[in-house]
Amino acid sequence: NCIYIGSSATNNRTNNVEIVGNQMLNCHYSGIYNGASYVDFKRVSDNYITINPNTTATTLSGIRIAAGTADEVSNNTIIIPRVAASSRTAYGIYFTTSVNRIKDISNNKIKITEATTSYGIYLSYMNLSADTNQTIVANNEIISDCSGTNYGIYASSNYNTHLYHNSIYLSGAGATSRPFYEVTAASTGSLKNNILVTLGGDATGTANNAVYFTSTSINNWDISYNNYYTI
């Protein structure tokens, strides 16, 4: 990892962390890796991150935040090329485990090339159902080429999460290709004014969908004014 940050206990939190304006080139595993659940970020912004194409790591990420808080994750450029490992799971920006409270995820540019599994932005447990917190995901550009499962924005167990003006382009031969995928029935949010394009898979594929909602989750979302394209 180019930058690793974490705390060991809830009574010893790391607070008001700013990671701004760095160049992180040829990182082996991850550009910014938050490995513990006790870090409160103020800003993770204006960073330029590339992964080393010669790495043999099989799981790669530009930015990884675990059960964190942040005012903004914005204006980052993340480039994950094809790497030496035969199996390559790539996450552009990865929010993982427990509850994340991120106010603003915006203006990030993510490019993933020839992964075997790809997640442009992985949103996990944004806010709680009883929270008044809002998460805005806006004006992000995601380009992902993948030979296997390919997701532009993958959303799981998110509440009050709003996606506006994102541009997502997926390609590759994978059987599953979805620019936006909400995997959890219990979720709330909005999806507006996005451009969602998948050229992945083939025209007979049943898992090539510009937008896919699991079960009844669509009942709790406001979806309007998006542009969709699939083969």
Image: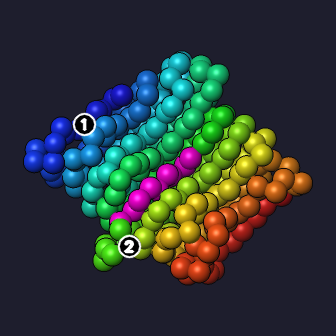
At horizontal 67% and vertical 65% (from top left) the residue drawn is: 211
Q: Which quarter of the rendering shows the N terminus? A: top left
Q: Give the residue pinned by disc 2.
A: 129
Locate residue 57, reporting x and y percent. Answer: 50, 23
Mark 2 and mark 1 in contact (Cβ < 8 Å)? Answer: no
Q: Main secondary structure of the magenta part?
A: strand
Q: Which mark is residue 125?
A: none
Q: In this picture, is 98 found above or below 133?
A: above
The stretch in magenta equals: 119-127
Three-letter code, disc 2? Ser
230 and 75: which is toward the camera: 230
Q: Is residue 181 left or right of residue 101?
A: right
Give coordinates of residue 124: x percent, y percent.
44, 55
Q: Are there few (<14), some (14-19), or many (20+) residues within 10 Å of tag 1? A: some
Q: Is residue 172 visible?
A: yes
Numbered circle sitting on residue 5: 1
Q: CA distance from mark 1 to mark 2?
A: 28 Å
Residue count near mark 2 (Cα–Cα under 10 Å), binned few <14, some 14–19, many ≥20: some
Q: Amino acid at mark 1?
A: Ile
